[in-house]
Amino acid sequence: MADGPVPADLRDRLTAVAGDTAARPLLVALDFDGTLAPLQDDPAASRILPAGVGVLADLAGRDGVALALVSGRAMADLHALAEVPAGTYLVGSHGAERARVTQFGLDRDVVELTHEQADRLAALGARAAAVARGRDGVWVESKPTAVVVHTRLAEPKDAVPAEAEALALGTELGVGTLHGKDVVELTVLPADKGTALQALRRELGAPVVLYAGDDVTDEHAFAALDPDDLTLKVGPGDTVARYRVADPAAAVAALAHLLDALG
């Protein structure tokens, strides 16, 4: 794959990490939507770019490399859409859910809510439905630990007040709130990608982490990582990541460069 869209400083850093035997195991952790899969108006239509499917499979097959997808999507949704090989770690719901892909399905960590959390989740669902009611293009997704108000399909006259009301609802009910691109997630089980990513690196004993993401929620992961880690922002917007590429095609090209450098 051509490496034209990959900046020279990023290529150099990827080459250096690939050649550093002390950087093993290398944890390659990636957001899904907007990073590997171009953003879609219909979330069910999201798919990893075809070139990316092969690159991820080859990376996962290399000794000393661990592959993970870290997403805001619910685990079942992420597993259904992501074409990743057995052995891949899946972190869903911004870190509230975790599993590993096997030949026979998912080996999942069990998520358990207290009675109080379950009651609060039910109340969130009902109140969030009221936020969406009567607003074209605003819809609510239910997750095992959260409800999500989506506004990607809505015009600004509906999206702006819906997001404002969802944020106010989170404050009123005292739940965790994540405000991303055209989405507000309200969770009864506080989690963020940075905490989840650091927990996974400790478990694997990974001295170096490569993390790529496109959304404001990925900034938690960028900020949580160490100066020697490789943080990659995909697309426009303010970021604390050290490197940036333009789009998912360029992100896949960067991963392909890493694969080539691994030899």
Image: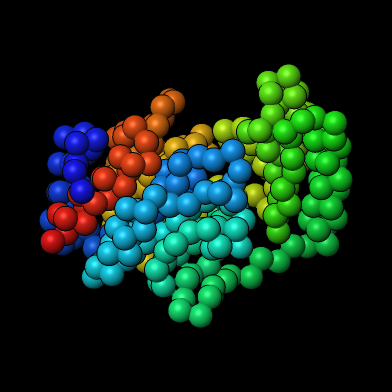
* Residue reaching furthest to the top: 157
Residue 43 at x, y percent in the picture = 59, 46
Quadrant location of the C terminus in the rendered image: bottom left
**Residue 109 occupies quadrant:** bottom right
Task: Name the residue at 86% across, 45% down.
Answer: 126
**Image spot of residue 11 (x, y percent):** 18, 41
User: Can you say whether 24 is above or below 123 in the image?
Assistant: below
- Front in this rendered view, residue 214 or 96: 214
Which residue does the image show at 79% across and 52% down from the upper left?
A: 121
Q: Is residue 144 left or right of residue 200?
A: right
Give the image quarter of residue 154.
Answer: top right
Q: Within the image, what quadrant is residue 41 found in?
A: top right
Q: Toward the viewer: 68 or 78? A: 78
Residue at 70% across / 59% down in the picture?
144
Instruction: Using the rendered image of the protein, determine whether residue 115 is visible from the camera's viewpoint.
Output: yes
Q: Nearer the viewer, residue 112 or 2?
A: 2
Residue 231: % across, % down: 34, 41
Q: Is residue 205 visible?
A: no
Which color scheme is applied?
rainbow
Name the residue at 77% across, 30% down: 136
Q: Is residue 97 above or below residue 45?
A: below
Q: Is residue 191 left or right of residue 162?
A: left
**Outermost residue toward the bottom in this view:** 104
